Amino acid sequence: MIVAAAIVKDGRVLACERSAPAEVAGRWEFPGGKVEPGESDAQALARECVEELGVHVEVGARVGPDVSLAHGRAVLRVFAVTLRDGDVPRALEHTAMRWLAVDELGSVPWLPADKPIVAELPALLAAERLA
């Protein structure tokens, strides 16, 4: 299982540019990673956010469907996530990061696995703006 975070703040979602491996470098994704043995999805996602972004998060509801990854050996599961304690994400493992509004979601080349989740974001971003 691979978990990823749709971090939403001020009506925008955080997108991260992959630096490696070479076949996906330059493509954009939601931050996250592999669930290790003994971890829940939420525990893995909280750990990955610290490792990749240097932030502590609250893991919320699922976003979109489970997505089978191209190699067929794993499934991507995305969760809505909020930052804790005023933390500010830093690109510790990515080339770049951008906060994207609804009208900017198509401005980056997303990894194929993340595209079904991107389609779910307008509703999530609209709900966050109303909260």
Image: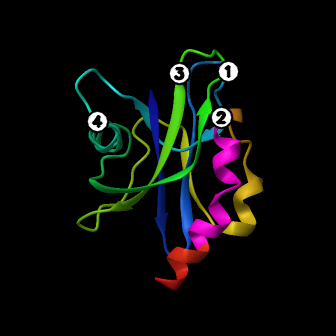
The residue to which callout 3 is attached is 74
- From the top left corner, tell me how far across and down residue 59 is, in percent: 34, 54
Which mark is on residue 113?
Answer: 2
Q: Is residue 48 magenta?
A: no
Q: Secondary structure at mark 1?
A: loop
Magenta segment range? 113-125
The residue to which callout 1 is attached is 70
Q: Earlier in the sequence, mark 2 or mark 1?
A: 1
Crowding near pointer 2: few (<14 within 10 Å), some, many (20+)?
Answer: some
Most common secondary structure along the magenta stretch = helix
When asked about the image quadrant of residue 33, the answer is top left
Spatial separation of the CA atoms under disc 4 and disc 1? 23 Å
Amino acid type for the residue under numbered disc 2: Ala
Spatial separation of the CA atoms under disc 4 and disc 2? 21 Å
Q: Earlier in the sequence, mark 4 or mark 1?
A: 4
Amino acid type for the residue under numbered disc 1: Ala
The residue to which callout 4 is attached is 40
